[in-house]
């Protein structure tokens, strides 16, 4: 789709009247619909392959809904709401930070297997450091490759990355942050508070705000605030010829507001998450994914990152993970009985 053939709404007299879509714009919606269809095909237990799209068959992409992804599901089901977990706000903050600063399920499981229930109340910097250092020396990976977790510089630090993050956790939980979060009046304010922590930039502070918002310590609508990460900005640049004329966050909000009409315009049967539409965080993530998808599907459309290959190859994981969402969303009573918590891999 070229800009002269833009949908009618681009020619309306509104603040997006001058926004000019590229050929990647329609692919954004087609990708969202097909990736969500794959999610439901796998959930039903349909046999592979779950798509005829050669790019989706070969390469790994996150789910259309962020909360349905494997790591987010583990965070929600096990780290936040797991059996016997304390729902004290301070303990929730501790667990979310500990899990997400490494963003790797195996690292959490290593600590839990050796230390038992992971609690701020019993946190011991030296014991955590000893376990993580031993794992690192033996060649184990501590961090996910999903996105870069920046190191923490702190007085007395020796440059060992995991020690810096243990220090960050100790700093966050030892101060007034949990009380300030409890007094926050918006998701944007939560983001601003988290951004004050050592080494946290816009992207990671926003991701942590969304993660914390899955629990009960805070409760704000996911459609109330968004921050565009580097991958999303690349995807936005690919979807719109003149993306630089607009704020990236405004374009994400634009996509959120247009979703039903765009699926209808393209004749796409988009199956939402049991009635929950795409939220701002999902539209942001989809820009990250279309940034990667377009490297193969639309190699002629250059974004701002300069990347030309998709590195991650799709490999089915051997163990299933259940489907379960924050109870406050009201979705869990709508799930098919065989999928709840112990269902198929997403």
Image (cartoon, rainbow, N blue to C red):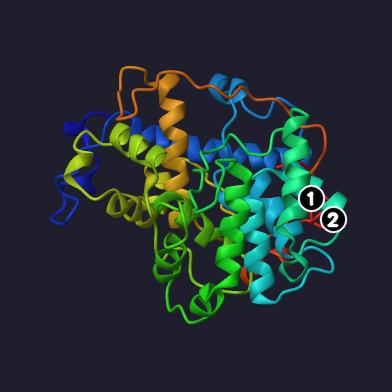
Residue depicted at x 45% and y 53%: 200
Residue depicted at x 23% and y 49%: 9
How far apart are the two marked residues, 2 and 1, measured between alpha carbons? 6 Å
**Quadrant occupied by the N terminus:** top left
Above or below for 147 versus 218? above
Residues 327 and 170: in front is 170
- Label 2 secondary element: helix
Q: Position of residue 54 (x, y in %)?
A: 56, 19
Numbered mark located on residue 197 in the image: none
**Quadrant occupied by the C terminus:** top right
Name the quadrant containing residue 290: top left
The reply, left or right, for residue 237 in relation to residue 69 is: left
- Label 1 secondary element: helix
Residue depicted at x 57% and y 33%: 61
Numbered mark located on residue 115 in the image: 2
Residues 277 and 194: in front is 194
Residue depicted at x 83% and y 62%: 117
The reply, left or right, for residue 338 in relation to residue 288 is: right
Residues 290 and 228: in front is 228
Q: Position of residue 171 (x, y in %)?
A: 56, 64
| Disc 1: CA contacts within 10 A as few (<14), some (14-19) or many (>=20) | some
Mark 1 and mark 2 in contact (Cβ < 8 Å)? Answer: yes
| Disc 2: CA contacts within 10 A as few (<14), some (14-19) or many (>=20) | some
Residues 339 and 293: in front is 293
What is the number of callouts on the image?
Answer: 2
Residue holding disc 1:
111
Q: Position of residue 162 (x, y in %)?
A: 63, 45
Name the quadrant containing residue 308: top left
């Amino acid at each position: 789709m070229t800009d002269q053939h833009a949908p009618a709404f681009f020619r309306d007299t509104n603040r997006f009247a001058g926004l000019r879509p590229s050929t990647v714009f329609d692919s954004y919606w087609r990708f969202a619909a097909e990736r969500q269809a794959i999610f439901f095909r796998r959930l039903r237990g349909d046999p592979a392959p779950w798509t005829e799209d050669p790019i989706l068959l070969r390469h790994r992409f996150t789910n259309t809904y962020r909360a349905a992804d494997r790591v987010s599901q583990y965070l929600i089901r096990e780290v936040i709401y797991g059996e016997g977990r304390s729902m004290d706000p301070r303990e929730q903050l501790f667990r979310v930070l500990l899990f997400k600063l490494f963003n790797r399920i195996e690292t959490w499981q290593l600590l839990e297997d050796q230390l038992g229930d992971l609690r701020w109340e019993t946190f011991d910097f030296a014991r955590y450091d000893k376990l993580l250092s031993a794992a690192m020396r033996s060649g184990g990976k501590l961090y996910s490759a999903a996105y870069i977790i920046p190191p923490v510089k702190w007085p007395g630090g020796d440059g060992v990355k995991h020690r810096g993050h243990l220090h960050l956790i100790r700093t966050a939980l030892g101060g007034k942050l949990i009380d300030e979060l409890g007094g926050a009046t918006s998701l944007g304010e939560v983001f601003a508070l988290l951004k004050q922590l050592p080494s946290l930039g816009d992207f990671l502070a926003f991701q942590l705000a969304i993660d914390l918002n899955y629990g009960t310590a805070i409760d704000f609508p996911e459609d109330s605030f968004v921050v565009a990460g580097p991958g999303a900005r690349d995807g936005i640049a690919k979807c719109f010829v003149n993306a630089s004329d607009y704020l990236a966050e405004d374009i994400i909000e634009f996509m959120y507001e247009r979703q039903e009409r765009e699926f209808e315009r393209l004749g796409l049967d988009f199956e939402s998450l049991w009635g929950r539409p795409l939220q701002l965080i999902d539209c942001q993530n989809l820009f990250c994914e279309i940034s990667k998808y377009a490297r193969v599907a639309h190699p002629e459309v250059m974004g701002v990152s300069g990347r030309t290959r998709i590195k991650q190859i799709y490999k089915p994981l051997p163990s299933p993970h259940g489907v379960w969402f924050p109870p406050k969303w009201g979705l869990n009573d709508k799930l098919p009985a065989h999928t709840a918590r112990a269902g198929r891999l997403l």
